[in-house]
RNA sequence: GCCGACAUAGCUUAGUUGGUAGAGCAGCCGAUUCGUAAUCGGCAGGUCAUCAGUUCGACUCUGAUUGUCGGCUCCA
């Protein structure tokens, strides 16, 4: 007998929470079943901050029903019903579920019987169904019974419903059965659940706070971008301030990549579709392109990516091994006809500006080049203090037809990227099926205010497109050889990066990024002349800033100083420069920081020096 | 694309048994000239997203379209 591990005295709270949430999902299902006895149940796992259950009813559940369900849940909770575990041979289980008309459970059980629990967990996204261990067939399964509700489930659960904490049903959504859009769509009921009422309230409060950081709201309040129904969905329009922010980000990344040998190129936004028929994108993405036709009858489309164009710059002349690596970079827009239901603020758009680059190199240069890119990613993200998670996105070897190239190619390329991660000492996780169709990638993701993950930077290895476009270089021995291609983006999409950035800072940008860095606030009209003088001096003062000056505005509205300070606060302007009689006399400014701190009177050179330092160091403080 | 919800002035929004819209902020005009988060008064601004339909009459009811939000699916 193996040594028993002692249970820790205090359960890790995550595990405890997750168990309670899972039990709450059962409680909700039990309540739904009492109200609508003909409800059919899909899967119902615990998730971040709560749980969900997928349910099918002849009459859809409406938001008004949520209160009713909650009330029934409380009733059942107060009865302190036990969670009772039963084991059944799989065939008996199938028969029982058939008797109850639970068609989805029957389907799961059959799947378990044939393919085992790993396959089921993978397909449903729910590993609570049964113990995840073997990938072979399962011979017996466990059920949990709560009151009249019996559910296929591996557990564990709390002992009885009285131990369930505070919960609230949050929303109803559609979700395809087994995650496949060809299947029927069930109703997914989401709930939040916490051990205590206080924790639940805290969570709801955090959600409210997150709304204030929503980039869509801040984009409007801070006048960064806008949308127009006339222009169309997913097509953001950038205001002067938003455009300035974009330029600052682009120039930052340019300042990092240019010294590393990246050369700018430029390509048209239209192309004949032949380009994508050659690259292989056509077969996969033709429905997601904006198609354009001209006079000639030739088929054109808006470019949805830049790699094929860049290969044609490479292919425009004979290349020698001596000129490799070639690193073509370009910050440029691509256009993708994303499904309307997926569009979301700047996070998911149809006009996407990529800070794209393609490196063409010798096979033996791949590591070095990938490491260079990794270095740029590190340097770029450092000043923001954003938490990035790193994913090695691999192909799905069970679906080779979704990808170009051979298993050998894929395994080799994946191993190379794994080496890169090891060399960097990165912490990463690996996911099959997340690769691009032409190669594996290292993806860097960040989260928004609601902690939804978004992919930003990416490093992709590609042996396929060089082959498709028959790219060559002349090797030292005089023979022609095939270069390797790396695709990379640092921000990813400028729009998406901005969405994450805005939420990361809650709109309060550090000095180097703030579209308006300082605002001069004259106390009374008689101070306007001095205020103008201050503005002029600052606007031409800061040669080391990326934009060549301090970005300063003057608020000469005939309003109270208090009002002007309030407005500047709401605009999250880092420095408020109050000038009155005293300052005019001393040639100074009274500096108030965005965080409310009063720096007192500073001479102009002192203030300029301060801003200069914050900009040059990309400081996060003021 | 699918499921569900929503759409009133630039922004936030009031407006239930269907009788042609009311406010705050922003804007404009005037007064106020102020020491660290909203001075006061006035004016203007709406074919109630669009298009059909029901009705004597539609912001209100029905349908379609467009857009937005939360999910699902997809994501080069």
Image (tube, helix red, strand yellow):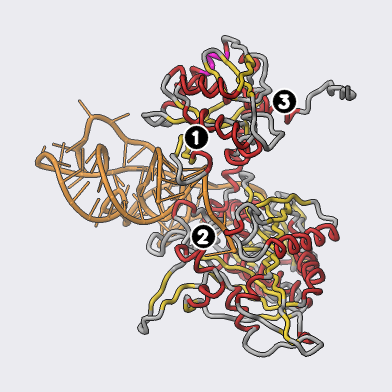
The answer to whether the residue labelled 1 contacts the one labelled 2, judged by CB atoms less than 8 Å apart, is no
Q: Secondary structure at mark 2?
A: loop
Q: Is residue A569 above or below residue A157?
A: below
Is A407 on the left or on the right of A213, as rendered? right
Using the image, name the chain to which the residue with label 1 belongs: A
Percent position (x, y) of residue A188?
50, 34
Q: Is residue A325 above or below residue A351?
A: below
Instruction: Say which of A600 and A617 sits in front.
Output: A617
What residue is shown with label 2? Answer: A349
What residue is shown with label 1? Answer: A188
Q: Secondary structure at mark 1?
A: strand
Q: Is residue A229 above or below residue A367?
A: above
Q: Is residue A295 one of those drawn in magenta? A: no
Percent position (x, y) of residue A375?
80, 66
Percent position (x, y) of residue A528?
60, 67
The stretch in magenta equals A73-77
Instruction: Say which of B62 and A548 sits in front.
Output: B62
Q: Residue at x 61, y 58 (%)?
A: A400
Give me the disc on residue A17: none
Tag 1 and tag 2 share a subunit = yes
Instruction: Say which of A409 and A461 sits in front.
Output: A409
- Cα separation, mark 3 vs mark 1, equals 23 Å
Q: Secondary structure at mark 3?
A: helix
| Image label count | 3
| Residue A79 appears in the rendering | yes
- Cα separation, mark 2 vs mark 3, equals 39 Å
- The disc, 2 or 3, on the residue closer to the chain's N-terminal end is 3
- Cα separation, mark 1 vs mark 2, equals 26 Å
Using the image, name the chain to which the residue with label 2 belongs: A
Is A112 on the left or on the right of B19, as rendered? right
């Amino acid at each position: 007998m193996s040594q028993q591990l002692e249970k820790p005295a205090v359960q890790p709270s995550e595990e405890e929470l997750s168990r309670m949430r899972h039990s709450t999902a059962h409680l909700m299902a039990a309540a739904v079943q009492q109200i609508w006895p003909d409800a059919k149940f899909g899967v119902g796992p615990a998730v971040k901050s709560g749980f969900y259950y997928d349910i099918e009813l002849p009459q859809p559940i409406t938001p008004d029903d949520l209160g009713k369900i909650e009330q029934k849940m409380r009733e059942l909770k107060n009865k302190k019903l036990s969670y009772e575990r039963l084991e059944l041979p799989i065939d008996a289980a199938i028969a029982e579920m058939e008797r109850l008309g639970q068609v989805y459970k029957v389907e799961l059980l059959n799947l378990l019987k044939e393919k085992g629990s790993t396959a089921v967990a993978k397909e449903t996204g729910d590993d609570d169904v049964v113990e995840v261990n073997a990938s072979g067939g399962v011979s017996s399964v466990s059920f949990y019974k709560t009151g009249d509700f019996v559910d296929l489930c591996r557990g564990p659960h709390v002992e009885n419903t009285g131990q369930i904490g505070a919960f609230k049903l949050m929303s109803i959504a559609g979700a395809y059965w087994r995650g496949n859009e060809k299947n029927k769509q069930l109703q997914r009921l989401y709930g939040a659940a916490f051990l205590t009422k206080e924790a639940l309230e805290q969570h709801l409060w955090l959600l409210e706070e997150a709304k204030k950081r929503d980039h869509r709201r801040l984009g409007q309040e801070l006048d960064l971008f806008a949308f127009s129904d006339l222009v169309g969905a997913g097509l953001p329009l950038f205001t002067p301030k938003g455009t300035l922010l974009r330029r600052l980000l682009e120039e930052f990344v340019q300042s990092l990549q240019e010294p590393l040998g990246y050369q700018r190129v430029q390509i048209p936004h239209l192309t004949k579709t032949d380009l994508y028929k050659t690259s292989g994108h056509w077969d996969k993405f033709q429905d997601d392109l904006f198609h354009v036709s001209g006079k000639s009858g030739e088929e054109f489309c808006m470019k949805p990516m830049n790699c094929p164009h860049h290969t044609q710059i490479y292919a425009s002349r004979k290349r020698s091994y001596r000129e490799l690596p070639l690193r073509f970079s370009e910050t440029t827009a691509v256009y993708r006809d994303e499904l309307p239901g997926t569009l979301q603020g700047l996070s998911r758009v149809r006009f996407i500006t990529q800070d794209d680059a393609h490196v063409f190199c010798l096979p033996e240069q791949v590591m070095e080049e990938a490491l260079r890119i990794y270095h740029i990613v590190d340097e770029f993200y450092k000043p923001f203090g954003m938490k990035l998670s790193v994913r090695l996105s691999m192909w799905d070897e069970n679906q080779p037809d979704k990808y170009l190239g051979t298993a050998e190619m894929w395994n080799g390329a994946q191993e190379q990227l794994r080496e890169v991660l090891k060399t960097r000492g990165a912490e990463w996780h690996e996911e099959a099926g997340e690769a691009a169709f032409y190669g594996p990638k290292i993806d860097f993701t960040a989260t928004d205010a609601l902690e939804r993950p978004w992919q930003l930077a990416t490093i992709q290895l590609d042996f396929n497109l060089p082959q498709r476009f028959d790219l060559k270089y002349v090797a030292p021995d005089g023979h022609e050889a095939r270069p390797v291609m790396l695709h990379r983006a640092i921000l990813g999409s400028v729009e998406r990066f901005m969405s994450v950035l805005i939420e990361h800072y809650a709109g309060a940008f550090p000095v180097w990024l703030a579209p308006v860095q300082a605002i001069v606030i004259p106390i009374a009209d008689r101070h306007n002349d001095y205020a103008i003088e201050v503005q002029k001096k600052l606007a031409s003062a800061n040669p080391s800033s990326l934009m060549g000056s301090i970005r300063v505005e003057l608020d000469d509205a005939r309003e109270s100083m208090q009002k002007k300070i309030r407005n500047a606060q709401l605009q999250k302007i880092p420095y408020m420069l109050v000038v009155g009689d005293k300052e005019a006399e001393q040639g100074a400014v009274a500096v108030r920081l965005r965080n409310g701190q009063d720096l007192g009177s500073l001479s102009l050179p002192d203030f300029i020096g301060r801003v200069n330092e914050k900009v040059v160091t990309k400081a996060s403080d003021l």
